Image (spheres, helix red, strand yellow):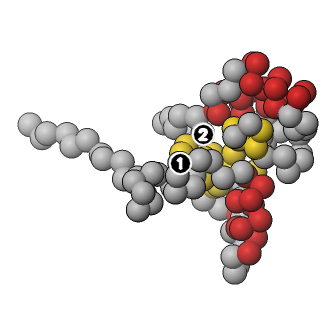
Amino acid sequence: EKEEEEEEEEVELYGSGCPVGALAGALSEVQGPVVSFSVLRPNGEPVGYSEVEKMAALHDPPIQLRTGCFCNPGACQSALGLSDLEVKSQHLQGGHSCGDSHDMVDGQPTGAVRLSFGWCST
């Protein structure tokens, strides 16, 4: 009998020991080739998606990605692990609305970054 080896997931770390990113939501076997995530600073705090989008545009050639809640606030809420109260705080008191660049409210991201394995599938 062959022993099945568990794949060990490699995580890129800063010198501080903090990860450089975190997946938004869970990956599944039925998921397509799109991954949503947040970029983290060396101290572990999230980088706002608008800042990530602007930095990606500076790359030559530009890195193709989408940011925000991807026109699906309920899925975004679930992927980010936000409570109903946190969402209300972000949208009502924090001034965030769909499509704006208000990417952080009270230190919490209001969306994520989404990458796919092809430009036409972002």
Q: Give the image quarter of residue 17.
A: bottom left
Graded by Cα atoms within 10 Å as few (under 14), some (14 to 19) or many (20 or more), the crowding at tag 2 reads many
Left or right: where does residue 107 sit relative to residue 41? right
Callout 2 touching callout 1 (CB < 8 Å)? no
Q: Which mark is residue 97?
A: none
Q: Is residue 27 above or below residue 63?
A: above
Q: Nearer the viewer, mark 2 or mark 1?
A: 1
Which residue has dot 1 on it?
Answer: 44
| Residue 69 in view in this figure | yes
Where is the C terminus found, in terms of image quarters? bottom right
Q: Is residue 92 above or below residue 6?
A: above
Residue ID at (65%, 62%): 118
At label 2, the amino acid type is: Ala
Q: Residue furthest bottom?
A: 60
Residue ID at (68%, 26%): 82
Where is the N terminus found, in terms of image quarters? top left
Give the x, y percent position of residue 21: 54, 51
SS of the residue under disc 2:
loop
Left or right: where does residue 36 sit relative to residue 93? left
Which residue has dot 2 on it?
Answer: 24
At label 1, the amino acid type is: Gly
| Residue 21 in view in this figure | no
Residue ID at (46%, 51%): 19
For the residues labelled 2 and 1, the Cα–Cα distance comes to 15 Å
